[in-house]
Image (cartoon, rainbow, N blue to C red):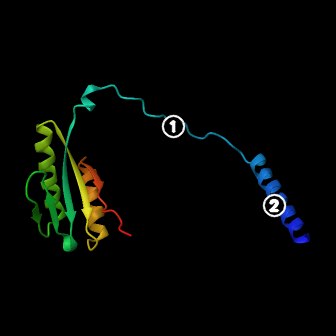
Amino acid sequence: MQQRGLLIRLIDVGLIILLGFVCISDINIRAQIKLPSPSNRKEDINRQYVVYYLVLHKNNRVSILDPGHSPTEWKNLRLKTLETRMIRLRNNFKRQGKILVMLIEPEPDATMQFLVDVLDLCQKNQILKNIANKALEL
């Protein structure tokens, strides 16, 4: 019974200390973040996106899966070559009024640096991108 009383006193002391810190802490709003306003533009609704799957393999090999076509494999590409091909795709779809989206899927044996480099290329050239992860199987 004496142990239980000691435990309750320790909990009380802990709560008093916590409330003391809350009371003496300086709470100031240091930044005001503007929330995005809802968009009423009709052109946002009519945009067409074209999704390409970019599969990264080991040894810097890349497969691109074009929707509606068979996969094309680009072997041992330098980043500059990959960049020019991605820009060419982006520009072709831009002329058609479509937006290119690269869905990047790294295989387990692909290097992380290659993934980061491809993401940087997309960012630099204003190509929408996302990383496709396969679902975990438990």
- Which amino acid, by three-letter code, is at mark 2? Ile
**Which residue is at a point 20% across and 59% down the rendered structure image?**
54
SS of the residue under disc 1: loop
Q: Quadrant of residue 9?
A: bottom right
- The percent position of residue 124, horizontal first and vertical second, equals 26, 51
Q: Residues within 10 Å of mark 1 (few under 14, many from 20)?
A: few
First along the sequence among labels 2 and 1? 2
Q: Residues within 10 Å of mark 2 (few under 14, many from 20)?
A: few
Along the viewing direction, whichever of 81 and 40 lies nearer the viewer: 40
Q: In which quarter of the image is residue 30?
A: top right
Residue matched to label 1: 33
Real-space CA distance between mark 2 and mark 1, rounded to the nearest whole angstrom: 38 Å
Residue matched to label 2: 11
Indicate which disc residue 1 carries: none
- Which amino acid, by three-letter code, is at mark 1? Ile
Q: In this view, does 72 lie above or below 31?
A: below
SS of the residue under disc 2: helix
Position of the N terminus, as image quadrant, is bottom right
Answer left or right for 127 relative to 91. Answer: right
- The percent position of residue 121, horizontal first and vertical second, equals 24, 56
**Which residue is at a point 39% across and 70% down the rendered structure image?**
138
**Which residue is at a point 30% across and 68% down the rendered structure image?**
113
- The percent position of residue 130, horizontal first and vertical second, equals 29, 53
